[in-house]
Image (cartoon, grey):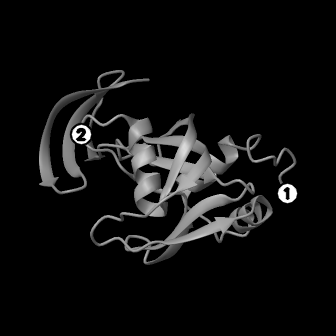
């Protein structure tokens, strides 16, 4: 199945994303309209410290209307390499520098209406320095042991999609081959 864009118009242009309304043609010739959030993409990094704990950040998320516990993450800058962006976000938000950073693949969080792709990484062999959060960003760092991480995911206390995806993809690396 495919859909072909026939025309489109930008209805909103913002600092983080743009919104377009496109006229499309589906297989078989039917036409429809699609509203699409155009997003430059992002990164998320599951950092694991020397004790096997996940280095997480707690911050208020305005869109969700509450505090959330999640992996360090952020938006890609134009032309930025996703791995370098993950290392940058990890350093800015937690002060950690990774000796090892491997890809966990990418996810599409809301493919029905948003073009965003989030590139996920696993970071190990951490050293520590100062943080450098973005303006308007307040984060608290928490080191979460694997058993609590899984318990919080199962109980819905961690419900951030990129965090859940990264933890699931890093299952073997977190020594949780038999996650509860």
| Disc sitting over residue 61 in the figure | none
Asked if disc 2 and disc 1 are in contact, CB closer than 8 Å, the reply is no
Give how far across and how far down residue 111 sits, in percent. Answer: 43, 43
Q: Secondary structure at mark 1?
A: loop
The label nearer to you, 2 versus 1, is 2
Task: Quadrant for the C terminus, please.
Answer: bottom right
Left or right of 120 on screen, residue 170 = right
Residue at 29% in and 46% down: 39
Is residue 165 in view? Answer: no
Give how far across and how far down residue 133 sits, in percent. Answer: 36, 65
- Residue most toward the bottom? 66
Residue 62: image quadrant is bottom left
Residue 77: image quadrant is top left
Q: Secondary structure at mark 2?
A: loop
Give neighbour class at mark 1: few <14, some 14-19, many 20+ (Cα, 10 Å).
few
Residue at 38% in and 70% down: 63
State how far apart marks 2 and 1 are (Cα): 40 Å
Is residue 19 in view? Answer: yes
Give neighbour class at mark 2: few <14, some 14-19, many 20+ (Cα, 10 Å).
few
Residue at 55% in and 62% down: 70
Residue 130: image quadrant is bottom left
Left or right of 80 on screen, residue 86 = right
Task: Write down the residue under mark 2.
Answer: 78
N-terminal of the pair, mark 2 or mark 1, is: 2
Q: Closer to the camera, 74 or 1?
A: 74
Task: Write down the residue under mark 1.
Answer: 180
Rendered view: 50 above or below 122: below
Give how far across and how far down residue 37 sits, in percent. Answer: 28, 49
Task: Quadrant for the N terminus, please.
Answer: top left
Q: Closer to the camera, 132 or 81?
A: 132
Left or right of 54 on screen, residue 107 = left
């Amino acid at each position: 199945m495919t859909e072909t864009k026939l025309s489109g118009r930008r209805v909103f242009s913002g600092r983080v994303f743009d919104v377009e309304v496109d006229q499309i043609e589906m297989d078989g010739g039917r036409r429809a309209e699609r509203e699409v959030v155009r997003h430059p993409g992002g990164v998320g990094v599951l950092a694991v410290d020397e004790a096997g704990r996940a280095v997480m950040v707690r911050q208020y998320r305005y869109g969700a209307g509450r505090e959330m516990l999640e992996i360090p993450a952020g938006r890609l800058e134009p032309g930025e390499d996703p791995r370098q962006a993950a290392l940058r976000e990890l350093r800015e938000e937690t002060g950690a520098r990774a000796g090892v950073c491997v890809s966990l693949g990418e996810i599409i969080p809301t493919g029905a209406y948003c073009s965003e792709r989030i590139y996920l990484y696993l970071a190990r062999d951490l050293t520590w320095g100062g943080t450098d959060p973005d303006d308007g960003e307040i984060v608290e760092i928490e080191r979460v042991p694997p058993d609590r991480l899984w318990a919080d995911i199962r109980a819905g206390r961690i419900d951030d999609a990129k965090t859940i995806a990264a933890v699931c993809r890093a299952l073997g690396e977190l020594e949780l081959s038999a996650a509860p």
